[in-house]
Image (spheres, rainbow, N blue to C red):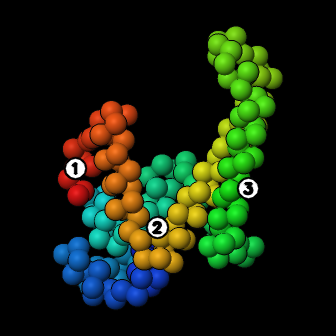
Amino acid sequence: MLGGALKEARMELGLTQAFVAYKVNVSESLVKEWERGKRFIQDAMKPVLARKIDCGKFYMALKSLVTGGVSSPELDGPMVDKHRNIAVDKAVEEMLEAVEAIKNQKTLLYAPPELATKETRETIRETILHQSVEALTGIDNMIMWICSDYGISPAELWDMHHRELAEKGYTKERAATRAAR
C-alpha cells in the first residue's frame, strides 16, 4: 500500500527510483522492492521518505497507514474531478455545511457531556462531527492538489503553521518538529 503511494508520488513529481534512493541513502533496488510491495518500508524510513519526497499524496497515504485510517482519505475515485477550481468549491461547500451544522447544534455542545442522552450523542456524531470530517477531507485534498499544481511544499507549509502556533503559545514545539527542519 505505502509502496504504491510512494511510486505514485515519485511519478507525479517526475522523480526516478535512483533519485529517490540517492535522497534517502538506500539502494535503487530497495526502492523498487518497496514500490512493488516486496519489502516493507521500515518505520524509521517513513518520515525520512516523507520529507525527502514532500508530496501530498504520500503524506496522506502515510497518515492513513499510521492512524489505521483515522484521517482524510485521498479522493481518487472515478467520480473525482481533481481540478483545483472544483477542489476549492467543494472544500468551501463542505466547510459551510460544517459551520451550519455546528451553529444549529452548538447548544448540544455547550451542555455538559455527562448529561447527554443517547439521542444527543447520536445527533452530535451524525451532524456536527460527520459534517466536520467531510470538511476536513475536502480541505486536505484541496491542499494536496493545490500544492501539487503550484509546486508548493506541503512540509514547508505545515512547518510554518506549527512555528506560528508555537510562537503564539498554542502548542509546544516538539523535538521531532525541530529535527524535521
Q: Which label number is shown at residue 56?
A: 2
15 sits to left or right of 18: right
Q: Residues within 10 Å of mark 2 (few under 14, many from 20)?
A: many
Q: Quadrant of the C terminus?
A: bottom left
Residue at horizontal 70 percent and vertical 11 percent from the top: 115
Q: Which residue is mark 3?
A: 93
Residue 141 at x, y percent in the picture:
58, 63
The CA span between labels 3 and 2 is 22 Å
User: For numbered disc 2, what is the local secondary structure?
Assistant: helix
- Amino acid type, callout 1: Arg
Task: Residue 165: name its quadrant.
Answer: top left
First reached walking from the N terminus: tag 3 or tag 2: 2
91 sits to left or right of 169: right
- Amino acid type, callout 2: Gly
Residue at horizontal 75 percent and vertical 73 percent from the top: 79
Residue at horizontal 22 percent and vertical 50 percent from the top: 178
Indicate which label's residue lies in the foreground, 3 or 2. 3
**Residue ranking furthest to the top:** 115
Determine whether label 3 and label 2 are within 8 Å by CB.
Answer: no
The CA span between labels 1 and 2 is 20 Å
Q: Nearer the viewer, residue 57 or 101?
A: 101
Residue 10 at x, y percent in the picture:
40, 81
